Image (cartoon, helix red, strand yellow):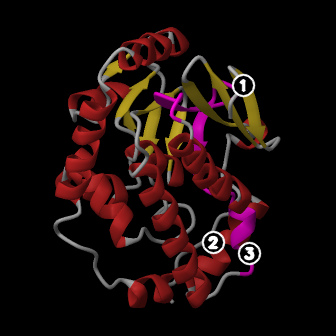
Amino acid sequence: MSDEHAAVGTEDLLVERDDGVLTVTFNRPEARNAMTWEMYQGLAEACDAVDADPAVRVMVLRGAGGRAFVAGTDIAQFTEFDGPAGVAYERRISEVLARLRAVDVPVIAAIDGYCVGGGLGIASCADLRLASPGSRFGVPIARTLGNCLSGDTLGLLIALLGRGRVVDMLLRARFIDADEALTAGFLGTVTDDVDATTAEWAATLKGHAPLTMWSVKEIVRRLSDLGGGIDDADVVERIYGSEDFHEAVRAFIAKEDYEWTGR
């Protein structure tokens, strides 16, 4: 990207560079910006574009439409899943999130609305997070789809929000509001003007020493990785291969209630 103002990406994932800031916009407002496989791939490619362009000093992630940052992964993509497909999916998501965490420049998540499931995972990989007062955060899968999080994603959430709060959120399918996310340290600020605050933060970061900021990011990333990964394939395969998951996906798409069987 040699132009001062350049845009790439796709209709669902807009990637724009302007004055040293590369902005990724999740652009499916009619679906609350739910992620498709192509959008996950585009996010990874945007990370590569940032690291390949020395003129980029800041990366910004945002959702279109004012209703959501990202409301998880598009449920329609799960209709043909089985256990091995679930393992492959969770591993791929872990790879994309790891790529986002490893971006050389500071990453800001500008959250306006729902930040749910995979969206919470994406926001957790940013270095700085801000949100509008009405934003809500959660992973309500125990109530909706009956799937699971990978060990990588769960560990990331625990590191940022605390074990007790994350377990409570998951088991009770509970959302937290922006004030609780701020108190937990997940957010840097809650603001009525997300765009203006994002621009202010980006301008500040552009004036700071790039290598110093990279060193902070990289050492924090290495510290968080000291615990190493866990072997969770058997857990993930059992969940994504279950009758409950398949029937809950069908019911969710059909807007029907589903009674859990534990099978």
Residue at the disc numbered 2 = 248
Residue at the disc numbered 1 = 3
Q: Whole-percent x and y of residue 199?
A: 50, 13
Report the Cα–Cα distance between label 1 and label 2.
Answer: 47 Å
Residue 221, above or below 216: below
Assess disc 2: are there few (<14), some (14-19) or many (≥20) residues with their C-alpha within 10 Å of its C-alpha.
many
Report the Cα–Cα distance between label 1 and label 3.
Answer: 42 Å
Residue 56 on the magenta segment: yes
Q: Nearer the viewer, mark 1 or mark 2?
A: 1
Residue at screen point 55% across, 14% down: 195
Q: Whole-percent x and y of residue 108?
A: 44, 30
Report the Cα–Cα distance between label 3 and label 2.
Answer: 10 Å
Could you tell me the amino acid type at mark 3?
Answer: Thr
Residue 94, above or below 34: below
Instruction: Tell me if label 3 and label 2 are in contact, CB under 8 Å.
Output: no
Q: Whole-percent x and y of residue 259?
A: 57, 73
State the image quarter where residue 234 is shown.
bottom left
Q: Whole-percent x and y of residue 31?
A: 74, 44
- Please give the range of residues in magenta: 54-80
Residue at screen point 32% across, 85% down: 231
Residue at the disc numbered 3 = 79
Quarter of the image where the N terminus is located: top right
Asked whether, in this view, residue 159 is left or right of residue 85, the answer is left
